[in-house]
Amino acid sequence: MNEVFLKSIQKIQESLKSTGFLRGRTFENYKGNYFCDCSSLFTSILKIENAELFERISRGDETLKSSDYFSYAREHNLFVDEISKLKLGDILCWKKDHIPKSGDSGHMALVISFPAREEDHLYKVRVFDATKTPHSNDSREEDGVGEGDLYLQTDAIGKIIGVRWSDQIQKIKRTPIIAIRL
Protein backbone atom coordinates (compact mmCIF):
# COMPACT_ATOMS: atom_id res chain seq x y z
CA MET A 1 0.00 0.00 0.00
CA ASN A 2 2.97 2.38 0.41
CA GLU A 3 3.05 2.98 -3.36
CA VAL A 4 -0.73 3.43 -3.45
CA PHE A 5 -0.56 6.12 -0.78
CA LEU A 6 2.26 7.91 -2.60
CA LYS A 7 0.32 7.85 -5.89
CA SER A 8 -2.82 9.02 -4.11
CA ILE A 9 -1.17 12.07 -2.60
CA GLN A 10 0.26 12.89 -6.02
CA LYS A 11 -3.33 12.87 -7.36
CA ILE A 12 -4.39 15.10 -4.48
CA GLN A 13 -1.55 17.56 -5.08
CA GLU A 14 -2.17 17.71 -8.84
CA SER A 15 -5.93 18.28 -8.47
CA LEU A 16 -5.95 20.50 -5.35
CA LYS A 17 -8.44 23.39 -5.63
CA SER A 18 -9.51 23.89 -2.04
CA THR A 19 -8.70 22.38 1.33
CA GLY A 20 -9.39 22.82 5.00
CA PHE A 21 -9.18 20.94 8.26
CA LEU A 22 -12.55 19.40 9.14
CA ARG A 23 -12.63 16.75 11.83
CA GLY A 24 -14.01 13.40 10.66
CA ARG A 25 -14.95 14.56 7.17
CA THR A 26 -13.93 12.37 4.22
CA PHE A 27 -13.73 12.84 0.46
CA GLU A 28 -14.85 10.31 -2.16
CA ASN A 29 -12.70 11.19 -5.18
CA TYR A 30 -9.65 13.12 -6.34
CA LYS A 31 -11.53 16.06 -7.85
CA GLY A 32 -9.79 18.85 -5.97
CA ASN A 33 -11.73 19.50 -2.76
CA TYR A 34 -10.11 18.01 0.32
CA PHE A 35 -11.69 18.83 3.66
CA CYS A 36 -10.60 16.30 6.27
CA ASP A 37 -8.47 15.68 9.33
CA CYS A 38 -5.32 13.56 9.48
CA SER A 39 -7.01 10.19 10.00
CA SER A 40 -9.92 10.86 7.64
CA LEU A 41 -7.34 11.66 4.93
CA PHE A 42 -6.14 8.04 5.18
CA THR A 43 -9.68 6.73 5.58
CA SER A 44 -10.66 8.53 2.36
CA ILE A 45 -7.69 7.14 0.43
CA LEU A 46 -8.35 3.61 1.70
CA LYS A 47 -12.05 3.80 0.82
CA ILE A 48 -11.16 4.93 -2.72
CA GLU A 49 -8.18 2.64 -3.33
CA ASN A 50 -8.79 -0.47 -1.21
CA ALA A 51 -12.25 -0.61 0.38
CA GLU A 52 -11.70 -4.21 1.46
CA LEU A 53 -8.66 -3.26 3.54
CA PHE A 54 -10.56 -0.35 5.06
CA GLU A 55 -13.37 -2.73 6.08
CA ARG A 56 -10.87 -5.05 7.77
CA ILE A 57 -9.32 -2.18 9.70
CA SER A 58 -12.57 -0.41 10.58
CA ARG A 59 -14.53 -3.50 11.60
CA GLY A 60 -17.71 -1.79 10.45
CA ASP A 61 -17.02 1.73 11.75
CA GLU A 62 -17.55 4.48 9.19
CA THR A 63 -14.68 6.65 10.45
CA LEU A 64 -11.45 5.92 12.29
CA LYS A 65 -9.19 8.01 14.49
CA SER A 66 -5.41 7.90 14.48
CA SER A 67 -5.58 5.86 17.70
CA ASP A 68 -7.59 3.20 15.81
CA TYR A 69 -4.96 2.95 13.06
CA PHE A 70 -2.21 2.87 15.71
CA SER A 71 -3.89 0.03 17.61
CA TYR A 72 -4.63 -1.97 14.43
CA ALA A 73 -1.02 -1.73 13.24
CA ARG A 74 0.32 -2.76 16.66
CA GLU A 75 -2.13 -5.69 16.94
CA HIS A 76 -1.18 -6.99 13.48
CA ASN A 77 2.55 -6.14 13.63
CA LEU A 78 2.28 -3.84 10.59
CA PHE A 79 4.80 -1.23 11.67
CA VAL A 80 8.41 -0.29 12.28
CA ASP A 81 9.61 2.10 14.96
CA GLU A 82 13.27 2.66 14.06
CA ILE A 83 14.39 5.71 12.11
CA SER A 84 16.75 3.64 9.93
CA LYS A 85 13.84 1.51 8.71
CA LEU A 86 11.55 4.33 7.53
CA LYS A 87 10.46 4.02 3.91
CA LEU A 88 8.65 6.37 1.57
CA GLY A 89 4.93 5.80 1.93
CA ASP A 90 5.08 4.73 5.58
CA ILE A 91 2.42 6.33 7.75
CA LEU A 92 3.85 7.97 10.86
CA CYS A 93 1.32 7.54 13.62
CA TRP A 94 1.05 8.28 17.31
CA LYS A 95 -1.80 8.33 19.76
CA LYS A 96 -2.46 10.22 22.93
CA ASP A 97 -2.17 8.40 26.23
CA HIS A 98 -5.64 9.60 27.21
CA ILE A 99 -8.02 9.71 24.25
CA PRO A 100 -10.58 12.54 24.56
CA LYS A 101 -14.25 11.97 23.72
CA SER A 102 -13.94 14.67 21.06
CA GLY A 103 -10.93 16.17 19.36
CA ASP A 104 -7.81 14.49 18.11
CA SER A 105 -6.53 11.17 19.41
CA GLY A 106 -3.02 11.55 17.96
CA HIS A 107 -1.73 12.22 14.47
CA MET A 108 -0.96 10.53 11.14
CA ALA A 109 1.30 11.71 8.31
CA LEU A 110 2.69 10.04 5.18
CA VAL A 111 6.50 9.91 4.88
CA ILE A 112 7.53 11.47 1.55
CA SER A 113 11.29 11.90 2.15
CA PHE A 114 13.94 9.87 3.88
CA PRO A 115 15.00 11.14 7.31
CA ALA A 116 17.86 13.64 7.35
CA ARG A 117 19.88 13.97 10.55
CA GLU A 118 19.71 17.50 11.93
CA GLU A 119 21.59 16.86 15.17
CA ASP A 120 22.19 13.94 17.53
CA HIS A 121 18.98 11.92 17.72
CA LEU A 122 16.89 14.48 15.77
CA TYR A 123 15.85 13.87 12.15
CA LYS A 124 13.93 16.04 9.70
CA VAL A 125 11.30 14.18 7.66
CA ARG A 126 9.03 15.61 4.95
CA VAL A 127 5.44 14.45 5.35
CA PHE A 128 2.06 14.83 3.67
CA ASP A 129 -0.91 15.18 6.00
CA ALA A 130 -4.01 17.13 6.96
CA THR A 131 -3.46 19.52 9.84
CA LYS A 132 -4.68 22.66 11.58
CA THR A 133 -1.12 23.90 12.10
CA PRO A 134 1.45 23.81 9.27
CA HIS A 135 4.90 22.23 9.71
CA SER A 136 8.24 23.79 8.69
CA ASN A 137 8.70 24.67 4.98
CA ASP A 138 5.02 23.91 4.48
CA SER A 139 3.04 24.04 1.24
CA ARG A 140 0.03 25.30 3.27
CA GLU A 141 -0.46 28.82 4.47
CA GLU A 142 -3.23 27.69 6.78
CA ASP A 143 -4.96 24.39 7.50
CA GLY A 144 -5.90 21.40 5.32
CA VAL A 145 -3.91 18.92 3.26
CA GLY A 146 -0.33 19.62 2.26
CA GLU A 147 3.28 18.81 2.93
CA GLY A 148 5.89 20.05 5.34
CA ASP A 149 8.86 19.07 7.48
CA LEU A 150 8.59 17.70 11.00
CA TYR A 151 11.29 16.38 13.30
CA LEU A 152 11.57 12.94 14.87
CA GLN A 153 13.60 12.29 17.99
CA THR A 154 15.22 8.90 18.57
CA ASP A 155 16.84 7.16 21.48
CA ALA A 156 20.45 5.91 21.44
CA ILE A 157 19.56 2.82 19.35
CA GLY A 158 17.44 4.68 16.78
CA LYS A 159 13.93 3.98 18.08
CA ILE A 160 11.57 6.90 17.42
CA ILE A 161 10.53 8.34 20.78
CA GLY A 162 9.30 11.86 20.07
CA VAL A 163 8.19 14.46 17.55
CA ARG A 164 8.74 18.18 17.09
CA TRP A 165 5.98 19.68 14.97
CA SER A 166 8.11 22.34 13.25
CA ASP A 167 11.24 24.42 13.62
CA GLN A 168 9.02 27.16 15.09
CA ILE A 169 8.17 24.93 18.05
CA GLN A 170 11.08 23.85 20.23
CA LYS A 171 9.11 21.45 22.42
CA ILE A 172 9.45 17.76 21.58
CA LYS A 173 6.41 15.64 22.36
CA ARG A 174 7.68 12.35 23.73
CA THR A 175 5.35 9.54 22.75
CA PRO A 176 5.54 6.14 21.07
CA ILE A 177 5.57 6.72 17.31
CA ILE A 178 5.24 3.99 14.72
CA ALA A 179 5.53 3.89 10.94
CA ILE A 180 2.57 1.88 9.68
CA ARG A 181 2.87 -0.37 6.62
CA LEU A 182 -0.51 -1.58 5.43
Image (cartoon, rainbow, N blue to C red):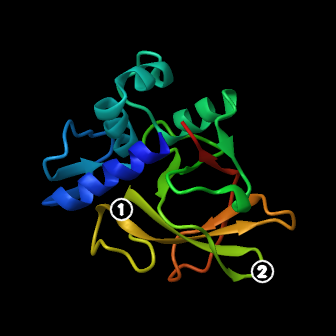
The three-letter amino acid code for the residue at tag 2 is: Asp
Q: Residues within 10 Å of mark 2 (few under 14, many from 20)?
A: few
Residue 139, located in which quarter of the rendered image? bottom left
The residue that mark 1 highlights is 132
Sequence-wise, the earlier of marks 2 and 1 is 2
Q: Quadrant of the C terminus?
A: top right
Residue 144: numbered disc? none
**Closest to the observer, 53 or 138:** 53
- Report x, y in % for residue 54: 42, 26
- Report x, y in % for residue 107: 50, 51
The nearer-to-camera label among 2 and 1 is: 2
Left or right of 120, for residue 55: left
- Residue 108 visible at all: yes
User: Image point 53% across, 33% down: which residue?
Assistant: 68
**Closest to the observer, 65 or 113:** 113
The residue that mark 2 highlights is 120
The three-letter amino acid code for the residue at tag 1 is: Lys
Total marks shown come to 2
